[in-house]
Amino acid sequence: MTVRKKLLGDWRGRLTKVAMPVPDRNTVVLAELKSLRERVPRLTGSVVASSDGLLIEHDLPPHIEPAGMAAMAAAQLSLSYRLATTAHGGGFNEVVVLGTEGQVVIYAAGYTSLTVLAGPEVNVGRLHLESRPVARAIAEHLAAAQTSEE
């Protein structure tokens, strides 16, 4: 590689890189997620995502990529909503995915979703008992924040 090509490549690299702003952490939602993790034993993480798959907030272990999990949760939420409305004509509340190494539960939270990850030995009744009110509280907080911005 010649010096000229190297300089040209460096120059192009500087022009094409766009600084992406890091969104401010939503402290109220993050506090809800951390509180949920403290109250439910064997809970491994949680994510709040918009209906179009954008990450709002997360409390995930480092080995799970938050934006990817948010996108998958939104896709599952959309599919589950469509399935529920087609089959019964009603709304959608939650979906549970049972895996061999744990569970993923997605709760509808207004126009967002709360996704909760738990180990296989979690008490499912306790998980639902604690997570449903958190999903409602997050939906209310985000709705209030949206109306105050307008």
Image (tube, rainbow, N blue to C red):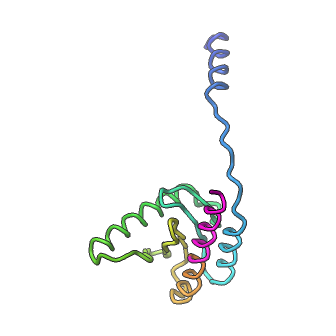
In which quadrant is the C terminus drawn? bottom right
Hey, which quadrant is residue 140 in on the image?
Answer: bottom right
Q: Is 71 in front, or is 122?
A: 71
First to last magenta residue range: 136-150
What percent of the width, then of the height, locates residue 69? 52, 60
What percent of the width, then of the height, locates residue 71? 49, 57
* Whether residue 98 is visible: no
Asked if residue 23 is positioned above or below residue 47 in the image, the reply reads above
Please give the count of numbered marks on the rendered protein.
0
Q: Is 133 in front, or is 10?
A: 133
Chief SS of the magenta region: helix
In which quadrant is the N terminus drawn? top right
Residue at the (44%, 77%) spot, across then down: 93
Residue at the (44%, 76%) spot, across then down: 94
Residue at the (60%, 80%) spot, across then down: 42
Q: Residue furthest left?
A: 87
15 in the magenta segment: no
